Amino acid sequence: MISSLVRSSILATGFVLSGLGAVAFADTFSVNPGAIGVGGPTVPNVNYADFSYVALVNQTATNGTGTFDEQGAGFFSSYRFPTLSDVLPNTGLNTNYKLYAVFAGAGTVAPTPGIPGGETATFTSFNLKLYVDPSLNSTILVSPVGTPGGSVSLTGTADDILVGQSSALVAGQAHAFPGLANGDFKVLVNFQPVGGFLSGPFSLALTIGTFDGVNTSLQGFSLNSFTSGRIDGSGNLSFTAVPEPTSLLLLGSGLAALGWARRRTRV
């Protein structure tokens, strides 16, 4: 198992290079419904899965500074390969089964510099689970905006199958903007598949799942405290495997040897 120190060093390097965009290239993974006893073809090459979602947010803040918590769920609509523009046909998704995520997060909020009325949310916790619905009968229920104790829940889940879950938050940030641009989000988590429905980069010791997208609608939001503000949005899921420490050490040794050889040839 990767130690927390090694994991932190790997991820810190990625963030220095590219901020929350530490996952620069999406690894190819496969979708195998037969592994969990569900009908539908195996899809051997997938880089992205796109989704739409709804979340309810509670915020305790004054003039945009404070804390928040949220809960939400979303359904996936297609698999894509090799780019986000390339939709794969006849995958069985939403024909043989549904795929959805449920999630909950919390963190801090602060005004977005240079954008009047804008807020930046930084996640300090985020938990996510992926499920397959073989009966295609699951639906999302959302409490009305502003409802005290409001919730996002699902019905028709009795036969649904857990196929993956986050094990830790790596980093996450979201923006809420007034007007036409409603904001965006990017959350990186350590991800673990369950049951073989997803396979590919997960054979390595650490896989980063990236949930990345935009907000299409904000309701009930303000810079101050509010209850059950609603976000609707869309985005995509991708995965990137981080090499095990042994692989990193071998890579480092190889680079060191190459550097030594180059120095010797210059003598």
Image: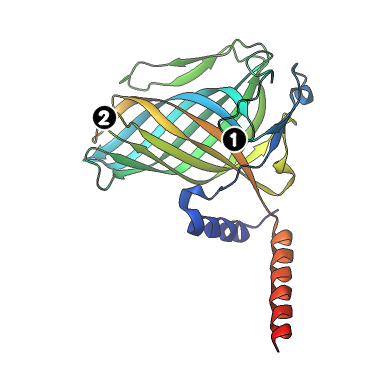
Residue 83: image tag:
1
Going by the image, does 181 lie left or right of 17? left
Which numbered disc, 1 or 2, marks the residue closer to the eye?
Answer: 1
Please tell me which residue is depicted at 60% across the width and 23% down the height of the picture.
78
Measuring from the top left, give residue 67's x and y in whole percent. Answer: 33, 40
Point 60% across, 29% down: residue:
86
Give above or below for 210 relative to 100.
below
Q: Is residue 36 left or right of residue 66?
A: right
Q: Secondary structure at mark 2?
A: loop
Determine the residue positioned at 66% across, 13% down.
95
Badge 1 amino acid: Thr
Q: Quadrant of residue 200?
A: top right
Closest to the observer, 38 or 255: 255
In the image, taking residue 41 as reference, residue 152 lies left or right, namely: left
Of the residues under marks 1 and 2, which one precedes in the sequence? Answer: 1
Q: From the image, which quarter does the C terminus lie in?
A: bottom right
Task: Please state the horizontal and vertical placement of residue 205, each as a whole percent of the image.
Answer: 70, 49
Q: As shown in the figure, which amino acid type bears the numbered disc 2?
A: Gly
Residue 234 appears left or right of 10? left
Number of numbered discs visible in the structure rendering: 2
Which residue extends farthest front?
266
258 or 109, which is in the foreground?
A: 258
- Looking at the rendered structure, the secondary structure element under dot 1 is loop
Its colouring scheme is rainbow
Q: Position of residue 201 (x, y in %)?
A: 70, 43
Could you say which is closer to the camera, residue 183 or residue 12? 183
Q: Which mark is residue 179?
A: 2
Is the residue under label 2 in contact with that under label 1 (CB below 8 Å)? no
Quarter assignment of residue 160: top right
Q: Residues within 10 Å of mark 1 (few under 14, many from 20)?
A: few
